[in-house]
Image: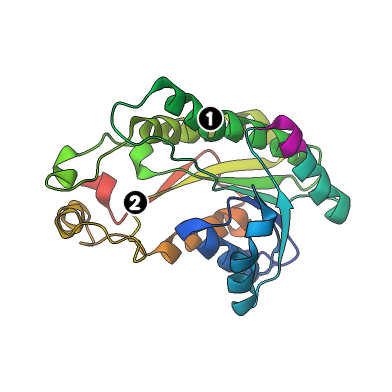
Amino acid sequence: MSEATNFSLQGKVVVQCGGTGLLGRELVKAIGQAGATLIVGTRDPAKYGPELERAKAAGVEVQVHPLIVSSEESVLAFRAAALAKHGRVDGLVYNTVSRPMKGEKPHAEEWRNSMETNATGYYLTLNAFAETMGQQETGGSIVSISSMMGMVGPNPHNYTGTAMSAMPDYFFHKAGMINMTRFYASYFGLKKVRCNAVSPGGIYNPESPQADAFLERYGKMTMLGRMANPDEINGAVIFLLSDASSYITGVNIPVDGGYTSK
């Protein structure tokens, strides 16, 4: 295989958990355009129509299956559907996230609801697909979408004078994703399964504009002076799914404009 085609996902079967939202819809387009056969798991496929239209407009064909990551039965059914149709899974992108908390001091039930998806769901999904990839001669690649918030503490100064605040569950489970990545990389490495994480920095959302004060303060915390665009995460994910990263496992790649390096 030439160096140029190492970065291609042509011929690979990739499953993605979480295909909506800023990052999810951009990842769907990028993974599909890189040549992969893409299967997206979503809670309610009947509501995925607008995302399918976006993908189609980008020249990407997406297969959609129901998936509730906090249900082991649902995760195993999703895996079974992918294997029944394609016989293997070469890559997994875990982009599912739940944000039930509304403040810095949430109720216990909000915390439990968050952990069902962001901790238990993450574990169930990684475990199911790592086991499958570990039984394949070619192994596979798992990419978890974490966050730089799993690497650092919150900076209250960023939120001063705004209605925004940091949520404790997000910092907890994003940090856990990074270390779980290391665990699975170690546990399944000899079975040719690579596990890595990508930790985006703040993503600018034009559909829900952040306060000007926040944008200014946050920009000054980065080396590039701005928040990320949603599609600027794609390159790192494609790289980790591709054969170009065949000797990379157990790492976390910050895509944060230098925020965590200052």
Q: Give the label, 1 or 2, closer to the camera.
A: 1
Quadrant of the frame with the N terminus: bottom right
Label 1, on which residue?
119
Q: Is residue 73 magenta?
A: yes
Q: Is residue 192 left or right of residue 4?
A: right
Q: Amino acid at mark 1?
A: Ala
Residue range of the region highlighted in magenta in the rendering: 71-76
Q: Is residue 148 magenta?
A: no
Q: Identify which residue, 73 or 14, lies in the foreground.
A: 73
Q: Amino acid at mark 2?
A: Gly
What's the residue at 76%, 50% (across, down)? Answer: 89
Residue 189: percent from left, percent from top:
65, 35
Q: Is residue 15 visible?
A: no
Q: Is residue 92 above or below residue 206?
A: above
The quarter holding residue 242 reads bottom right
Q: Is residue 26 left or right of residue 78?
A: left
What's the residue at 14%, 42% (across, down)? Answer: 157
Label 2, on which residue?
201
Residue 203: percent from left, percent from top:
35, 57
Q: Is residue 200 left or right of residue 28?
A: left
User: Is disc 1 surrounded by few (<14), some (14 to 19) or many (20+) residues within 10 Å?
Assistant: many
User: In what element is the residue under mark 2?
Assistant: loop
